Image: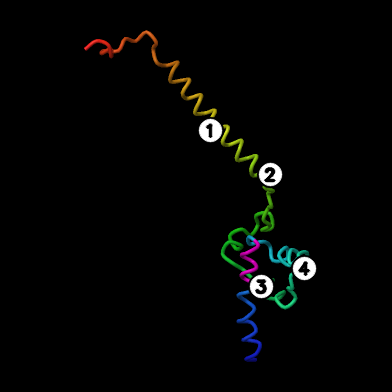
Amino acid sequence: MQQSFELMCRNRPGAITLHRAHRLPNNRVLLLNLEAKGIAHKHLKGYILSVSCDACRVAIGKCDNKTSNVDLAKRERIAQQNKTKKVLEFDLSQIQQVIQTPSNAIPLRTPWIS
C-alpha cells in the first residue's frame, strides 16, 4: 500500500508536466504523441489518462479539447497580413486628414512676417 502511494506521488507530477509541456492536449492525443516520438510512457499511462487541469475542464466540448497546430509559415503570413492592414489604415487616415484640411486656409501668423 505504501509503495503504491509513493509510486503515485512520484509519477503524477511527471504526467502533469508532460500534459503542460505538450500544450494541454487531449489525454489520448498526448499518449499518441509520446508514442510517435519514442518517449517511454507505459509507466505513466494511467496517470496521463487521469490528468484533468482547469484549462481542460473549461475547454470540454470545444472540438474535443484538441489543440490545433498552426504551422510557422501560416502564423507568419497572418502576422504579415495584419501588419500590412495596419499600415494601410494608417496611410488612409493620413490621406483623409490632408483631404479634410482646407488648402486655401491662410495661417494667422506667417513665419516670414513678424
**Secondary structure beneath label 1:** helix
Q: As drawn, is 71 to the left or to the right of 84?
A: right
Q: Quadrant of the C terminus?
A: top left
Residue extending farthest top:
104
Main SS of residues in magenta: helix
| Gap in angstroms between the C-alphas marked 3 and 1 | 45 Å
Going from N to C along the chain, the mark reached first, 2 or 1, is 2
Q: Is residue 73 above or below residue 62?
A: above
* Image coords of residue 6 (percent x, y): 62, 86
**Marks 3, 2: nearer the viewer:** 2
Q: Amino acid at mark 1?
A: Lys
> Residue 101 vs residue 44: left or right?
left
Q: CA distance from mark 3 to mark 2?
A: 35 Å
Rate crowding at label 4 as few (under 14), some (14 to 19) or many (20 or more) other CA atoms within 10 Å: few
Q: Is residue 11 above or below residue 106?
A: below
Q: Earlier in the sequence, mark 2 or mark 4?
A: 4
What range of the chain is rendered magenta?
16-22
Question: Which residue appears at 30% of the width and 12% of the height?
Answer: 107
Q: Does the magenta run of residues contain 17?
A: yes
Q: Which mark is residue 38?
A: 4
- Say which mark, if any, is on residue 50: 3
**Disc nearest the viewer among 2 and 1:** 2
- The extreme bottom residue here reads 1
First reached walking from the N terminus: tag 3 or tag 2: 3
Category of crowding for the residue at label 3, using alpha-carbon neighbours closer than 10 angstroms: few (below 14), some (14–19), many (at least 20):
few
What residue does disc 1 label? 86
Q: Position of residue 60 (x, y in %)?
A: 63, 60
